[in-house]
Amino acid sequence: MKHLRFLLSFALIAGMIAFTGCEEDDDPGMLSLEAIEGTGTDLETGNEVTKDLNAATAAEDVPLDVTIHVTFSKEVDAATITASTVALSGNGDVSLSLSVDGANVTIDPDQDLGRGTEYTLTLTNGIVAADGGEFESVTRTFTTAGQPQVTPPQEGSQIAYFNFNESIEDQTGNYSVVEANSSYEGFVEDRFGYQNSALQMDGETNILDVENDGNLVNPSTTISFWFKTDLDDEHVANGMFVMGATAEYGFFFEIGLLENGNPWFKVATRHMQHPESANDFGSATAWGDAIKGEGAETGDVWSGDLRAMLDEQWVHFVLSYDHNTGMKRAYMNGTLVWEMNLQEGDEWKMKEMHIDMENATDASNNIGIGFAGSSDNHSTGWADYQTFVDEGTHKTFYGLMDDVRFFSTALSQSEVNTLYNDEKP
């Protein structure tokens, strides 16, 4: 009898062990991560490149148009790959398109990522294997290619910004380009060597016509941009306009050559009469401000080699005018090259910078990037865009343009230097 009880007990224990063993065999293993790769267009070469986003150190120079491929250890339950279990964030959350093929998950951002920005990819434990295996949450960081967005001095006073990164749109969203009236050669390599990151203009018909509600030029104004041109090209010889609004009734920048081949850079601006002026002119243009780099002109404060600075080089130019002090200043590559107090003297005193639409005829106050005014400005014969197009005369800008900024205030010299240092290669 004791022997029988022993046999029954042994059989019961053996059955329990066998049952437990079956349960362990049926328990699905954990779902694990095997690889994360990002594929897209290299910003410098334009070629396709693949980056390891699962390496021990965070990946850098990841393409802006990256598609992320995640490989798991086994098949994934597609229903668990959702916006709540897969996230990408940088300067805010990124909208994603997700797809699953067995153990492979494809993550495709709905728009290009920002330049020089750190992103975090999060895969949560809500992801489950097709056999029910659980997954432990992971995060991976990486940094995209390109220069990070510069926060300019007096950012709150920046009213327009054109970065020309494959787009002619104002990045502040305040202003728009009249595309029907605008043309350009395309987007090319910028001063950092990144593809499709600067605007190319042909010196013949190219112009960007920027709509102006009257507030792009203010009593105190700063205009900042980068440009590059070839001084020996035929487009420059007779003078070419770089940018402007309604020519002498607003403002314009112009480059030309002296007889000896040395360049000059004109910075003409329109101003309201100062109340203390002895002359009843109402509104007038400050003309005598051609930068020649020879220290010979009124207002020149720099005697460097302007040709060496401008010829086939990326140049940072800034115009800053403060209507409170009357100081008009021009900077190149952070260096003050020209200044004048427009409120000095008894007769000609000038105050607020403005666009004089009262005296301009058959004109708009739109800004022409690449010319002395917009394409529909006919108030001045020597700055009539259509006339030059019809005659085939080269007066529009020839070269490259980048990072055009408008401020509704006058940046100080230290602020101009800060902007230059933040934006230079």
Image (spheres, rainbow, N blue to C red):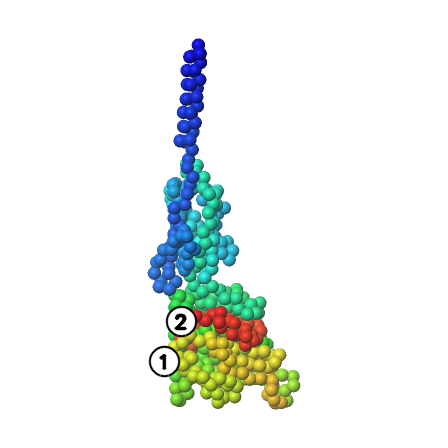
Tell me, yes or no, if residue 177 can be seen here.
no
**Residue 265 versus residue 214: which sits nearer the camera?**
265
Can see residue 397? yes
Q: Position of residue 335 (x, y in %)?
A: 49, 79
What residue does disc 1 label? 233
Which residue is at the front of the view, 268 or 318?
318
Measured in 3D between alpha carbons, the distance from the residue under mark 1 to the one under mark 2, in whole angstroms, is 15 Å
Q: Label 2, secondary structure: give it.
A: strand
Q: Is residue 92 above or below residue 154?
A: above
Residue 288 appears at what percent x and percent y?
51, 86
Q: Is residue 339 above or below residue 214?
A: below
Residue at image coords 51%, 55% = 92
What is the crowding at mark 1: few (fewer than 14 residues within 10 Å), some, or many (at least 20)?
A: few
Using the image as rendered, state which of residue 362 and residue 106 is in the foreground.
106
> In the current view of this chain or complex, which residue is farthest to the top?
1
Q: Quadrant of the N terminus?
A: top left
Question: What label does residue 61 carry, if any?
Answer: none
Q: Earlier in the sequence, mark 1 or mark 2?
A: 2
**Which quadrant would residue 327 be assigned to in this image?**
bottom right
Task: Give the residue at mark 2.
Answer: 200
**Identity of the amino acid at label 1?**
Asp
Q: Which residue is drawn at the image coordinates 42% and 18% (left, top)?
A: 10
Q: What percent of the width, then of the height, locates residue 359?
A: 56, 81
